[in-house]
Image: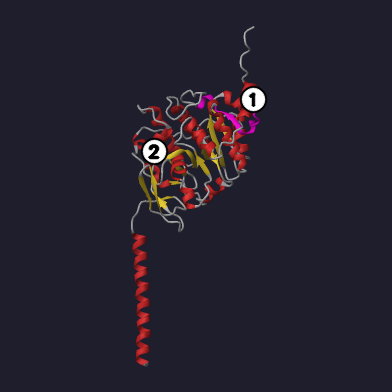
C-alpha cells in the first residue's frame, strides 16, 4: 500500500507539472501570435438577430472588453496631396468665451450643429439633455444667424454661438435638409470644419447630431471611462449593426495629430471628389488609415435607428441605452417614430409662439 500511495502521489505531481507546462506553452504561443491591433467594443453579448430577413451574427462575449475591427473601404486619403496645417486662426473672443464656458473639466466639449430649419430637433435634443441632467455644459454651433437669434430669444444664449463666416468652405442652407437633399452635403461638410477648428484649440470634441435623444445621465462620463488612459484617438457610433461603417452623427475625437490629419483628409475628399461626398462618406473612405486608433461604441448602449427601431438589441439584452440616434427614418417618419415611443419632448405650441414672436407674419394689406 505504501508503494501504491507513493506512486499515486508521484502521478499527481507529474500530472500537475504537465498541466502547468502545457498552460505556459499555450500562453507563450498566444503572446507570440501576430494579430492586427483590434478595436474596442465593450459589453457585447453573443446574439443572432433577425433583421430584414437576414441573420446578423454577433460573435462576442460580455466577459470583459471585446474587440471588433473597423471595416473601411480604401485609403484614398493617404494618396492625395493632403496638407495638415500647423495651426488655424483662432476665432473671435466671443466664440472662444462660449467654448471655454461650456468645456468640461476633462477638456471635453459636447457640441451640436444646426441651422434654422433643424430647430425642432435641436430643441428636442436640448430637452433630452435637461431630462438626463446633462445640460450644464454644451455648445450649439449655429449655421445661420436666424437660428442663433432664435436660440437667444429662447433663453439659450449661453449655449449658442455663430459659426465664423471664414470657417465655411461652402455656403450653408438655413432650410431643413434631409438626407437625400442636394444641400445636405454642405451641412455635413460644415460639421467637419467645425470639429477641425476645435481640435486646433486643443479641445476633445463629443459631437452629436440633433436627431439624437439622450436617454441616460452620465453618458459622457461613461464614454470617457471606456478609455481612461486616452490610448485611442476617437470613438465612433456604428452606422449599421456590429461590424459596419462608422456613423459620424455621434463620436468623440481627441486633438491628436492623427485626428488633425484624418479630418484634413476627409475635408480634402469632400472638397475635391466628383461625387460630392458627404462627411460620412469621406470618413468611411479613409477609415482604414487610422483603424488602429479608433474604437466603436457598443450598439446596445449607443444605438443607431436601425439597431434601436428595427432590431432593438438593447431590449433583447435587458440594458438601457445612453442615447438613441434616430437615423434610418426620414422626414415625418422620424418625428412620428420618436413620438410613438414617448421621445418627442418638444412643446409645439411653445415653438410656434416663439417663431411668431421672432418672425411675425406680414400684416394683411389695408
Identify the coloring. secondary structure
Q: Label 1: how many residues lie within 10 Å, few (<14), some (14-19) or many (20+)? A: few
On screen, residue 264 above or below 355: below
Quadrant of the frame with the N terminus = bottom left
Q: Residue at x 41, y 34 (%)?
A: 266
Q: Quadrant of residue 345?
A: top right
Give the x, y percent position of residue 111. Answer: 55, 36
Q: Residue furthest top?
A: 366
Give the distance between the C-alpha atoms of the residues marked 1 and 2, in whole angstroms: 41 Å
Q: Residue at x 58, y 26 (%)?
A: 147
Q: Total marks drawn?
A: 2
Q: Which residue is mark 2?
A: 284
Boundaries of the magenta span: 153-167
Q: Residue at x 39, y 30 (%)?
A: 277
Quadrant of the frame with the C terminus = top right
Residue 198 in sight in this render = yes
Q: Earlier in the sequence, mark 1 or mark 2?
A: 2
Q: Residue furthest bottom?
A: 1
Q: Disc 1 on helix, strand or loop?
A: helix
Left or right: 343 in relation to 50: right
Residue 265 in sight in this render = no
Eye-nearest disc, 1 or 2: 1
Comparing 165 with 91, the one in front is 165
Q: Which residue is mark 1?
A: 353
Q: Quadrant of residue 26?
A: bottom left
On screen, residue 18 above or below 265: below
Comparing 45 with 204, the one in front is 45
Q: Disc 2 on helix, strand or loop?
A: helix
Give the x, y percent position of residue 158. Answer: 64, 33
Q: Is residue 140 magenta?
A: no
Amino acid at each position: 500500500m505504501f508503494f501504491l500511495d507513493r506512486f499515486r502521489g508521484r502521478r499527481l505531481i507529474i500530472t500537475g507539472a504537465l498541466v502547468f507546462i502545457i498552460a505556459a506553452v499555450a500562453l507563450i504561443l498566444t503572446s507570440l501570435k501576430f494579430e492586427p491591433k483590434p478595436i474596442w467594443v465593450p459589453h457585447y453579448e453573443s446574439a443572432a438577430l433577425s433583421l430584414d430577413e437576414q441573420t446578423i451574427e454577433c460573435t462576442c462575449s460580455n466577459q470583459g472588453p471585446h474587440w471588433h475591427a473597423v471595416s473601411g473601404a480604401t485609403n484614398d486619403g493617404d494618396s492625395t496631396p493632403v496638407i495638415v496645417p500647423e495651426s488655424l486662426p483662432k476665432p473671435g473672443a466671443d466664440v472662444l468665451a462660449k467654448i471655454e464656458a461650456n468645456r468640461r473639466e476633462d477638456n471635453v466639449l459636447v457640441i451640436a450643429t444646426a441651422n434654422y430649419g433643424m430647430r425642432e430637433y435641436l430643441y428636442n435634443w436640448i430637452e433630452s439633455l435637461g431630462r438626463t441632467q446633462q445640460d450644464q455644459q454644451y455648445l450649439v454651433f449655429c449655421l445661420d444667424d436666424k437660428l442663433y437669434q432664435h436660440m437667444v430669444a429662447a433663453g439659450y444664449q449661453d449655449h449658442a454661438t455663430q459659426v465664423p463666416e471664414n470657417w465655411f468652405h461652402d455656403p450653408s442652407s438655413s432650410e431643413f435638409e434631409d438626407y437625400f437633399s442636394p444641400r445636405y452635403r454642405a451641412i455635413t461638410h460644415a460639421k467637419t470644419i467645425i470639429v477641425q477648428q476645435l481640435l486646433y484649440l486643443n479641445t476633445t470634441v463629443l459631437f452629436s447630431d440633433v436627431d439624437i435623444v439622450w436617454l441616460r445621465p452620465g453618458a459622457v462620463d461613461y464614454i470617457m471611462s471606456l478609455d481612461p488612459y486616452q490610448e485611442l484617438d476617437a470613438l465612433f457610433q456604428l452606422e449599421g449593426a456590429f461590424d459596419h461603417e462608422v456613423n459620424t452623427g455621434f463620436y468623440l475625437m481627441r486633438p491628436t495629430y492623427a485626428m488633425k490629419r484624418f479630418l484634413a483628409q476627409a475635408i480634402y475628399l469632400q472638397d475635391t471628389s466628383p461625387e460630392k461626398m458627404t462627411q460620412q462618406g469621406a470618413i468611411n473612405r479613409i477609415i482604414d488609415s487610422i483603424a488602429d486608433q479608433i474604437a466603436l461604441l457598443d450598439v446596445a448602449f449607443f444605438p443607431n435607428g436601425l439597431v434601436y427601431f428595427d432590431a432593438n438589441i438593447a431590449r433583447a439584452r435587458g440594458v438601457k441605452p445612453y442615447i438613441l440616434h434616430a437615423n434610418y427614418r426620414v422626414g415625418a417618419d422620424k418625428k412620428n417614430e420618436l413620438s410613438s415611443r414617448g421621445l418627442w419632448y418638444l412643446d409645439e405650441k411653445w415653438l410656434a409662439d416663439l417663431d411668431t414672436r421672432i418672425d411675425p407674419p406680414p400684416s394683411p394689406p389695408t
